[in-house]
Image (cartoon, rainbow, N blue to C red):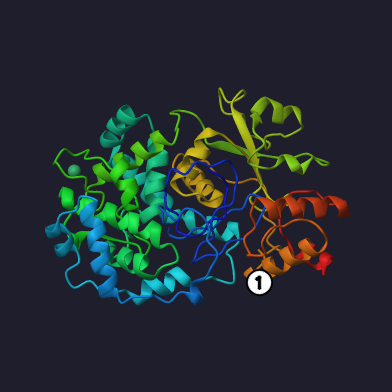
């Protein structure tokens, strides 16, 4: 999937996707809109929601009471093979959760710059904890690497990003949250599918209803899997007969490895590396859809920072050029393993954080380039204004929804080109002002 700005708790779904498309914006964190939009993600939900949906929230009024909804959903669940006993036990005392509705409808005005997001994600404490856990779980990680072919550093990095190594898993009842979202959320069909999957998990006996806890969006356990992802990828690695991603570290880490394996992880390959882009570079090439062998990028003048070298064997691997903060900020060539991480959470800032965190465990992963800290992300209303201005000038930015997706980025590049600026597709205050 792509580099997206996704901030919405994105479900990990295996949605097919081409690269660098912007998917959703996160309810909690809006996103910035940018070239390869990076999104600051939250503590991170993994599994998130598939695609961005226009916010019709204010208009949604349930047409039925919760009890009426529950009765009709019960029929649906029974038809899907859920037993009456499972359903009734799971729904005992369940009422809608107003906090979930609020979270689902929130559309934050401001986005966090990617450098601030990375500072939080790569805190020295998290790096230290990760190193310690790599040592403590060395034998387990060795077995997981053998079984799934996924490198231990990325597993521990995902674990750190998703739940701070199991410490922050979310404490909401998954059934209650999903029932609330199915009853009156913005994506009722998605929530219903997740709810059926959650009931299947209960029916299978992997976890008791009271212990099935997660984020408001239904992401569960140490790996923050949504229920459908759990059903396809959670594994029982400690052999006790239950897939317990909440309490069993072997189950959680092996489940993550299983997911990354399915997402195309290639053991021993780098995720990518930092590069420097020459003056006069054609920034239209900095787009996830433009993948070329590393050697071709080098032929175009892209260089490694002084003192670093090309990871062994990467010369012919396909790579895309990622500019998380536009042409003025650091640049990276990202390879197939970076794409595998995006399938966990479709946000390029998330994937960059996981990648760099994994490197930090080994003592590298520091960025040589400087972030353009004078260039804060546009707010949501500024992004809408920019889209309207672009459309007014005849550059087709698509719907003015405040989300910088592929169309908007293309419109920005065209506008930048006509101004004689680097066409990086990155939304800046300078561009907004020049169009006003
Ligand atoms: Ca188990």
Residue 168 left/right relative to 420: left
Answer few, some or many: residues within 10 Å of disc 1's Cα (few below 14, many 20 plus, some between 14 and 19). Answer: some
User: Is residue 188 placed above or below 314 in the rendered structure?
Assistant: below
Quarter of the picture holding the C terminus: bottom right
Against 224, residue 337 (above or below) is: above
Question: Residue at point 33% right, 69% down?
Answer: 180
Q: Is residue 54 above or below residue 227?
A: below
Question: Mark 1 sits on what residue?
Answer: 381
**Looking at mark 1, is its residue's CB closer than 8 Å to ligand 1?**
no
Residue 243 quadrant: top left
Is 129 placed left or right of 120 in the picture? left
x, y (%) of residue 18?
Answer: 57, 40
| Residue 308 visible in the snapshot | no
Count the labels in the image: 1
Give the image location of residue 244, x and y in percent.
22, 48
Viewer-proximal residue, 157 or 240?
240
In the rendered image, the vertical position of residue 391 relative to residue 366, given as above or below: below
Residue at (39% x, 63% y) in the render: 188
Q: Quadrant of ligand 1?
A: top left
* Whole-percent x, y for residue 397 in the image: 72, 57
Confirm whether residue 244 shows in the render.
yes
Residue placed most toward the observer, 296 or 46: 46
- Tell which of 143 and 258 is nearer to you: 258
Q: Residue 155 appears at what percent x and percent y?
A: 38, 41
Quadrant for residue 97, please give it: bottom left
Name the side, left or right, on which 412 lies relative to 377: right
Secondary structure at badge 1 equals helix
Please give the name of the residue rendered at 80% of the width and 64% of the height, measured from the top-left corner.
Answer: 392
């Amino acid at each position: 999937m792509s580099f997206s700005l996704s901030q919405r708790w994105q479900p990990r779904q295996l949605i097919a996707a081409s690269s660098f498309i912007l998917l959703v914006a996160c309810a909690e964190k809006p996103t910035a809109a940018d070239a390869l939009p990076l999104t600051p993600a939250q503590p991170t939900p993994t599994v998130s929601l598939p695609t961005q949906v226009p916010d019709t929230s204010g208009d949604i009024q349930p047409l039925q009471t919760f009890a009426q909804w529950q009765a009709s959903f019960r029929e649906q669940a029974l038809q899907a093979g859920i037993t009456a006993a499972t359903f009734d036990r799971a729904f005992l005392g369940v009422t809608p959760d107003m906090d979930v509705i609020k979270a689902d409808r929130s559309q934050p005005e401001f986005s966090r710059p990617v450098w601030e997001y990375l500072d939080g994600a790569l805190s020295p404490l998290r790096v230290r904890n990760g190193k310690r856990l790599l040592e403590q779980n060395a034998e387990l990680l060795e077995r997981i690497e053998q079984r799934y072919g996924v490198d231990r550093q990325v597993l521990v990095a995902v674990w750190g990003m998703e739940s701070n190594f199991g410490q922050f898993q979310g404490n909401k009842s998954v059934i209650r949250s999903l029932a609330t979202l199915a009853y009156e959320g913005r994506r009722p069909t998605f929530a219903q599918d997740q709810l059926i999957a959650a009931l299947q998990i209960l029916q299978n006996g992997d976890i008791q209803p009271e212990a099935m806890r997660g984020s408001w969006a239904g992401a569960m356990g140490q790996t923050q899997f949504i229920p459908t992802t759990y059903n396809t990828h959670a594994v029982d690695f400690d052999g006790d007969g239950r897939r317990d991603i909440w309490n069993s570290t072997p189950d959680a880490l092996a489940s993550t490895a299983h997911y990354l394996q399915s997402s195309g992880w290639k053991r021993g390959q780098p995720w990518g590396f930092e590069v420097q882009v020459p003056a006069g570079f054609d920034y239209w090439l900095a787009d996830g859809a433009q993948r070329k062998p590393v050697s071709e990028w080098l032929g175009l003048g892209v260089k490694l920072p002084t003192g670093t070298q090309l990871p062994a064997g990467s010369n012919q691997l396909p790579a895309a050029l990622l500019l998380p903060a536009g042409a003025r900020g650091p640049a990276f060539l990202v390879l197939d393993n970076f794409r595998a991480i995006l399938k966990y959470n479709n946000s390029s800032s998330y994937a960059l954080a996981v990648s760099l965190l994994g490197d930090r465990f080994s003592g590298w992963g520091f960025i040589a380039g400087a972030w353009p800290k004078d260039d804060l992300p546009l707010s949501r209303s500024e992004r809408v204004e920019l889209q309207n201005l672009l459309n007014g000038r005849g550059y087709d930015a698509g719907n003015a929804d405040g989300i910088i997706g592929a169309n908007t980025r293309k419109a920005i590049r065209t506008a930048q080109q006509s101004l004689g600026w680097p066409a990086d597709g990155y939304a800046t205050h300078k561009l907004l002002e020049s169009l006003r």
